[in-house]
Image (cartoon, helix red, strand yellow):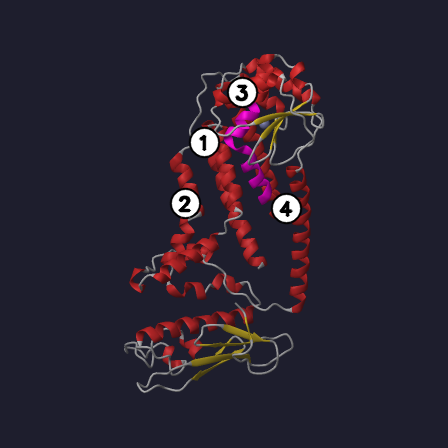
Amino acid sequence: MMFALGKHLLESTIFALFVGVVTLVFRRRGPATRYMFWLLAAAKFLLPAEIFSLLGSRLAQLLPASHVSHAVPVLLLRWVAPSTISVPPHTANTNVLNLLLLVWFFGCAVMLISWLRTLWRAPDFSESRDDPSQETLQRLEQRVGLRQAVKLRFSDSIAEPLLFGLRKPIIMLPVGLSGKLSSGELESVILHELAHAKRRDNWTAAFSHGVTCIFWFYPLLWWIEQQLHRERELACDEMVVRYGAAPGDYVAGILKVCRLQLSESVAGTSGVCRSNLKNRMEAIMSLSAQTTATPTPKTLMGGLVAAVFLVPILVGFFAPVGAYGQNQLAIATLPSDQASAIGCLRSIITAEKFYRKLYQGGWSPSLVSLGVPRKGMQPSASAADLLDNSLTSGTRRGYIFTYTAGPKDLRGKTTKYSVTVRPITWRKGDHSFFADQTGIIRWTDKNRAPRATDAPIN
Ligand SMILES: [Zn+2]
């Protein structure tokens, strides 16, 4: 499990680094585009390639074998193919793993609870229907072209305007703020919040913070969240000026608001002042109403989405049939002898499946029948060329493999088989394994022959 998590984090980190390079190369594309890139980088942390490659492999299994190609680069296959092997760990490892899981769960719970409390508990507010900013809001809503109505409320427990709520967003203004701003400044401040509503920033901010809560121990996600925050504000600034606010009024409005700012930042809400002010002021003053929105490059975005979804699905789909049972990379990271034993057992199970297809429904009569034929001979039912001879000899890395063929049917085909894998010399903590025609691998840590009633490992 720790290996799978580490691999997933490494894979997501490499993707985030790639996204970082892409945002640098396409920095002139504007903050809205950069925001989409960083959002995808955050989403990648919830989308392990293994899940999609497994999906691809399941899809391939639904089709006839002739549809399955073997032309997948080995490196890609080894990286993306799922580490399906799970070994009963030693007790000491289990304790460490349980402790780490507990720490993760506790951190996750604390973060989620404290965030959701602030997200769902609206500050006390009043309606003030006769406040002049209500009329400003109605006018601006039409200008922005929002699909859903946004309400305007006033609260004395906030010190800066913010957009609150996900399904029914509410713009909240500090009580008395509208009296301290000129009409142009008030308009630009409300436009800023409407821009957040139009872009559905509260949803995406909540999503990215949710990912950060799950991976709270990983600093990169905190950093990505900061990038998202910065790009989100810059994207809204562009929209505010594009919707007709004078940059001078806008900057003055933000500065006035920020002088009053006292509240704390809440992810999933959007406020005016939570960003690098100096850079923002400079960026706003460089904008004009003629500044056009730069569309997100669809090909590039599509390519990044494909890297996250399609590539692993295709790798899983076109991978060799046995690849998902013989993930040597995963095996290599487990306690070596056990991992080797399980890997060999999986190879035997896969070879048996092939053998049964090739030789009309019968399982192999012996382990040797799965092995390599003699020089110059063609593969046959007594040497099917499906397993390495070093394995068919019956011993590998401290383990003995004992193959037992079941009774034959009227056609002379073997109807079932079983394989036991036992350490040559049993020591406390060692495991023995068992598999049969069901393909399920079972294990025991007792000093006896493993059997079909033992616990499965996967
Ligand atoms: Zn904002």
For the residues bearing labels 2 and 3, Cβ distance under 8 angstroms: no
Residue beneath disc 2 = 306
Quadrant of residue 277 in the image?
A: top right
Label for residue 138? 3
Chief SS of the magenta region: helix
Mark 2–mark 4 distance (CA, rounded to whole Å): 27 Å
Determine the secondary structure under disc 3. Answer: helix
Of the pair 376 and 346, the residue shown nearer to us: 346
The x, y position of residue 239, in whole percent, is: 50, 23
**On-image quarter of the N terminus:** bottom right
Residue beneath disc 4 = 216
Three-letter amino acid code of the residue under disc 2: Ala
Mark 3–mark 4 distance (CA, rounded to whole Å): 40 Å
Label for residue 69? none
Determine the secondary structure under disc 4. Answer: loop
Mark 1–mark 4 distance (CA, rounded to whole Å): 29 Å
Residue density around tag 1, few if under 14, some if 14–19, many if 20 or more, within 10 Å: some
| 25 magenta-colored | no
For the residues bearing labels 1 and 2, Cβ distance under 8 angstroms: no
Number of numbered discs on residues: 4
Q: Earlier in the sequence, mark 3 or mark 4?
A: 3
Q: Earlier in the sequence, mark 1 or mark 2?
A: 1
Mark 1–mark 2 distance (CA, rounded to whole Å): 19 Å
Residue density around tag 2, few if under 14, some if 14–19, many if 20 or more, within 10 Å: few
Residue density around tag 4, few if under 14, some if 14–19, many if 20 or more, within 10 Å: some
The x, y position of residue 109, in whole percent, is: 67, 49
The x, y position of residue 417, in whole percent, is: 43, 81
| 206 magenta-colored | yes
Residue range (magenta): 191-211
Please tell me whether mark 2 or mark 3 is closer to you in this view. Answer: 3
